[in-house]
Amino acid sequence: MNKIILLSVVVSCVIISGCSTVKPWQRGYLSKDVMTSANDPLGSSLDNHIYFSKEGSSGGGQAAGGGCGCN
Amino acid sequence: MKKMTALSALSAAAMAIPSQAEVAPTDKTLSYRYTNYQEADSPRERTFTAETGRYQIDVQQFGYRTPVGESWYIASELQFESMSGASPTQTYTDADGKSALIMSGASIEEQRVDIKVAPKKYFAGGTAGGLLAMSKENDYQSLAFGLDGTLDIFNKHTTLIGSFSVSNDELSPTDAGLSTSRTEADGQKKRSFSVYEGISQVIDKYSTLQAGIGYTQLTGYLSDPYKFEDRRPDIRDQITLSVQHKQFANVLDGAALHSNYRYYYDDWGIASHTLDVRWAQALNLGKFRLIATPLVRYYTQTKADFYTLKQNPADTDLNSSDYRLSSYGAFTVGFNSELKFEQWAFHFDWQQYTSRESFALFGASDDEAPALVNFSTFTAGVDYKF
Amino acid sequence: MNFLQHNFTAMASPCKFILQGEAPAIKQACLKAEAEVQRIEQKFSRYRESSLLQVINKNAGIRSTKIDAETAGLLNYAQLCYQQSDGLFDITSGILRKAWNFKSNRLPREETLQQLLPLINWSSVQWDQDEILLPKKNMEIDFGGFGKEYAADRAAEIFQSLGILHGLVDLGGDIRIIGDKADKSGWNIGIRDPKQPDSAISHITLHQGAMATSGNYERFMQIESQHYCHIMKANTGWPVNHWASVTILAPQCLVAGSLATLTMLAEENGEAWLKEQEVPFLTIDIKGIQSSNL
């Protein structure tokens, strides 16, 4: 089941990569602050730390990093 | 003259000139955040010990990000945590079939220091970076090292992302003589190895999608030395599949919908789904710009194979009654705000987390888990760019 | 929404960025865009010892020089200009400055020109994606014919990639729009009067794209009522003398500028050629007669 999910993610990425032709000068919206604000580094670092300590799962958008005694 | 007009021939040739290096950020930023984290008391009617108060944590974060030379950028973070309170040591089903929760006795006072440094180099087609992280607290220390990289392909529409990290931790439980589990854990090590591969795609002018897969392996002493009857395997394999979508919306002074889904699976029997949705709304108020972001997160997990509420499981059996390994669901509602003025940005964030056995979407069980935690956090912070 | 203007000097010209939006983001973006203009100037400068162009020119007749993808892209572009102009646009013709000194008010000596002409030969230059070799000693390449326009495009792209939606880049009169004004009313741009370059002979409203002008008034000398300007024909070593100015509109400033220069070089054939190109243009010949499809 997991293999099917993985395969469909990869396949959809490959399909999507053929779809877009955004010129470099059209990228303005993508770097607007509302598009990047959800990644405030200190805020996400703390959120990840809290959820790592208080839930049974961890990880997601990047490799693990350091640990703590909380889990 | 020529068959193709000069305009089209020259335009094509001009487009073919590759655009320059991924430009390294040129800002220096100093940041400070204070966060107060507060857990709700454990339920009085289920708590067998006198203490029902749980953790209260004060966190201070200091961040400094700066360009170095022409194409390097270094991000660093220093974090101080001060924890006090009690935590669950065991939950078991009593003779009446109800769950009894035992909390740790005296309230602990602990300090934790964490430092992270991540340098990154910017190239014509991508980036390469590293991470060094160290943390120390009364009963635990951790050292981690990682490398990451990105590569732009398909004319920068697609970015390949890869990272890996390893960590080496050591336990030194306080009052090691208090129980056999604490004594056993003293000096024990915990290691992790983690990789993440992702792909980020520009879908159109207004949206992007990132998908990735991660794998982590933990080895060593993985049990919780402070809990009773807590014996976990000495290896844990974890997989995550995650998808993140961002969509710009031309509402008021700009807005974006951020959606994040993660599927997690490990060989302890835990499978979880996480969905995090945020709406970042910008509003220009004279010389100020406010970004108000309400957010909702839903989390559901199944229980670990060796999670039981037996009061006295056999000593040779794996076992844990840690609520974090039980089957439950949780909702977070929150509100983040960022107020920008010239080179300053002020942050005020709030989150409320509520977890219940009945919120679980999959693999719900009839067991009560009175140790399930509810907490709220409040953060105030400031950034200065120069 | 506020208008902000950032002025600086680069490529021996007054440069400005005019933008609309929030001040902090704009200030940061101006620094990056100006840095990009300086980067291009320094990389392709004929005046800096350390520039890539100087290294290529010093190695002429001796050895080949390694180049990067950006330089190869620009050489390819120069090659296309050479082909489209049937050899009149030639980036090896920069050495003619050794014969033509506009401050001296004297015409060049014919012997000097005859010595230089054999060194003006783009088709003899050996180059590929990785390196370039100028076969004879004293041969030079010069990106001055399109450096400013290229920099204008790159600066505008940097603004766009940083989320700036309204503004324009103006490097010494070579203009690239970053984005229309917030109220969509377009940017009002003047076209210089060749006889009085400080005033405008015409105005045009641009919402997107670029505008570049090639004129005989930028560097010139007047000797016995004959006008000699800085745009030289590669085959004769003498300047063109049919158009006073050619203004072109195109999506990219680099292309607009090259089409303007190519029209100047085509002299009397330029009119017909320009009409074939299907670009918006405004030409003024040396008699002052305007022709335009704007």
Image (spheres, coloured by chain):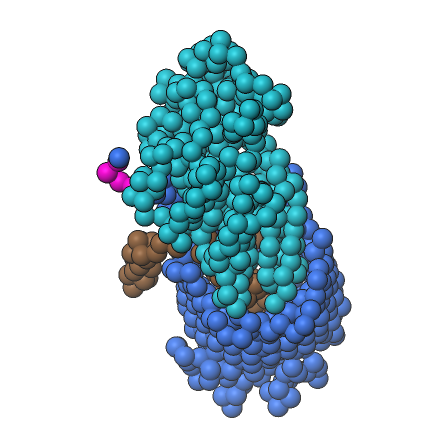
Query: Is B4 one of the magenta-colored residues?
Result: yes
Whether residue C22 is visible here, answered yes or no, is no
Q: Which chain is cyan?
A: C
**Does A4 sit left or right of B87 as displayed?**
left
Q: Position of residue C57 (x, y in %)?
A: 51, 19
Q: Residue furthest left?
A: B3
C101 vs C181, nearest the viewer: C101
Is the residue C281 above or below the residue C96 in the image?
below
Nearer to me, C237 or B176: C237
Residue nearest the observer in this picture, C164 or C181: C181
Residue at the image point whose x is 44% and y is 52% from the top: C209
Q: In the figure, what tint was chain A given?
A: brown
The residue lying at 54 percent from left, 28 percent from top is C225
In this picture, which residue range is highlighted in magenta? B2-6
Q: Position of residue B121 (x, y in %)?
A: 56, 41
In this picture, is C197 found above or below C168? Answer: above
Q: Quadrant of the N terminus of chain C?
A: bottom right
Number of numbered labels in the structure image: 0
Colour of the chain lettered B: blue
Does residue A65 appear anywhere in the picture? Answer: yes
Q: Residue at x 35, y 31 (%)?
A: C85
Q: Quadrant of residue B210?
A: bottom left
Coordinates of residue B238 in the picture (x, y in percent): 44, 58
B195 versus B2 height, above or below: below
Image position of C22 (left or right of C176): right
Give the percent coordinates (x, y) of residue B27.
66, 51
Is residue B331 toward the left or the right of residue B345 in the image? left
Quarter the C terminus of chain C occupies: bottom left
Residue B97 lies in magenta, yes or no?
no
Instruction: Give the residue at x 39% y 77%.
Output: B363
